């Protein structure tokens, strides 16, 4: 092999490029990842828990950051739960999941990313206050600077990216916020994360779903019924996407059985 002065030797082979293995997109893992956001109590955690009804997704681990896993207790009792009370625990759990595949989990969920970001900022501000006190200065723990906002955004991006890259199904839930575009005046619903982080985190996922409820009336009996729905297609006012291009724009069957089978090709659109 010829090596030119100052240039690394070529690592191009029939099945690798730059030392990295080539692979066809058709050979990609059937694992799915999705960000699901909506109002508190709309059913996001229960939807994640319903992954336990899918053999290919079992067993299921919910990283309960929000303390909301009670909604799964009676309907999906075999779902496993870790109560997360600080951001460092999310990093520690990832290290163990990455280091040893014998854990047996096929699906992991961060519930919710909204609260996880707040834990990140709380830890950052604790350190800031301590360091300021050591210098004889004072910092308000509730008033982060631009520097602290930058740090928390990078922490959350890093952790979400690491979980997404595990050889598992990965879901993250978030609350919803209304973002108003000052130029157009249009208010858009988006995952409840600060600043640009909502858009950046949404970009990490193949699927972004807005979950909401809608009251419908049976035209014959006049009975009212509350439906849970998912939007998978972006609009002027809703943040959503579906890279699989297999989900309906409005998904009316809010179960992981339906979502998984549809996204992995078991159900034709």
Image: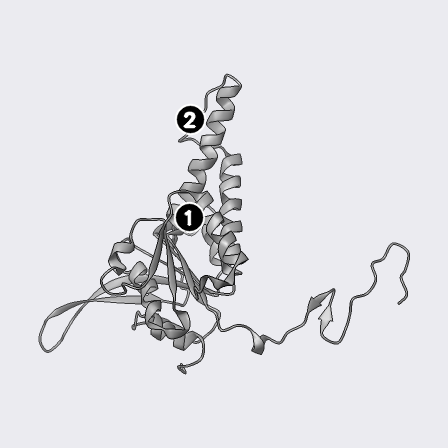
Vertical position of residue 121 compared to residue 164: above or below = above
* Vertical arrangement, residue 137 with respect to residue 20, above or below: above
Can you name the residue that lies furthest to the bottom here? 268
Quarter in which the C terminus is drawn = bottom left
Q: Residue furthest front?
A: 102
Give residue 96's position: percent from left, percent from top. 50, 54
Report the number of numbered marks.
2
* Residue 248 visible (yes or no): no
Q: Residue at x 75, y 76 (%)?
A: 14
Q: How is the image coloured?
A: one colour
Q: Secondary structure at mark 2?
A: loop
Can residue 206 be seen by looking at this rendering? yes
Farthest residue in the top direction? 136
Answer with left or right where residue 23 lies relative to residue 163.
right
The residue at the point 51 percent across, 63 percent down is 101
**Left or right of residue 99: residue 141:** left
Location of residue 261 in the rendering, given as x and y in whole percent from the top left corner: 39, 77
Image quarter of residue 15: bottom right
**Residue 214, percent from left and from top:** 23, 64
Secondary structure, mark 1, is loop
Give the numbered dot on residue 237. none
Spot occupied by residue 152 in the image (x, y as percentages of width and height): 49, 42
Q: Quadrant of the N terminus?
A: bottom right
Spatial separation of the CA atoms under disc 2 and disc 1: 22 Å
State the residue position of label 2: 140
Q: Quadrant of residue 37?
A: bottom left
- The front one of 163 and 182 is 163
- Cβ–Cβ below 8 Å for labels 2 and 1? no
Pointer 2 local density, CA inside 10 Å: few below 14, some 14–19, many at least 20: few
Residue 35, compared with residue 116, is above or below; it is below
On the image, numbered disc 1 is attached to which residue? Answer: 193
Q: Is residue 185 above or below residue 100?
A: above
């Amino acid at each position: 092999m010829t090596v030119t002065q100052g240039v690394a030797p070529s690592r191009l082979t029939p099945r690798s490029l730059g030392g990295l293995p080539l692979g066809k997109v058709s050979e990609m893992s059937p694992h799915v990842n999705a960000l699901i956001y909506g109002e508190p109590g709309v059913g996001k955690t229960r939807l994640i828990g319903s992954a336990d009804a899918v053999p290919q997704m079992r067993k299921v681990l919910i990283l309960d950051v929000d303390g909301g896993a009670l909604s799964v207790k009676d309907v999906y009792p075999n779902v496993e739960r870790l109560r997360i009370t600080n951001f460092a625990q999310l990093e520690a759990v990832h290290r163990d999941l990455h280091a040893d595949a014998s854990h047996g989990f096929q699906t992991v969920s961060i519930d919710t990313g909204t609260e996880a970001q707040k834990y990140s900022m709380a830890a950052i501000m604790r350190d800031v206050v301590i360091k300021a006190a050591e210098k004889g200065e004072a910092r308000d723990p509730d008033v982060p600077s631009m520097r602290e906002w930058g740090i928390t955004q990078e922490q959350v991006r890093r952790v979400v990216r690491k979980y997404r890259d595990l050889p598992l199904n990965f879901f993250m839930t978030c609350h919803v916020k209304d973002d108003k575009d000052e130029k157009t005046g249009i208010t858009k619903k988006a995952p409840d994360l600060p600043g640009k982080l909502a858009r950046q985190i949404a970009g990490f996922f193949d699927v972004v779903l807005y979950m909401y409820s809608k009251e419908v009336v049976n035209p014959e009996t006049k009975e009212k019924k509350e439906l849970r729905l998912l939007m998978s297609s972006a609009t002027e006012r809703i943040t959503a996407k579906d890279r699989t291009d297999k989900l309906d724009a409005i998904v009316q069957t809010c179960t992981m059985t339906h979502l998984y089978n549809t996204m992995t090709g078991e159900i034709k659109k």
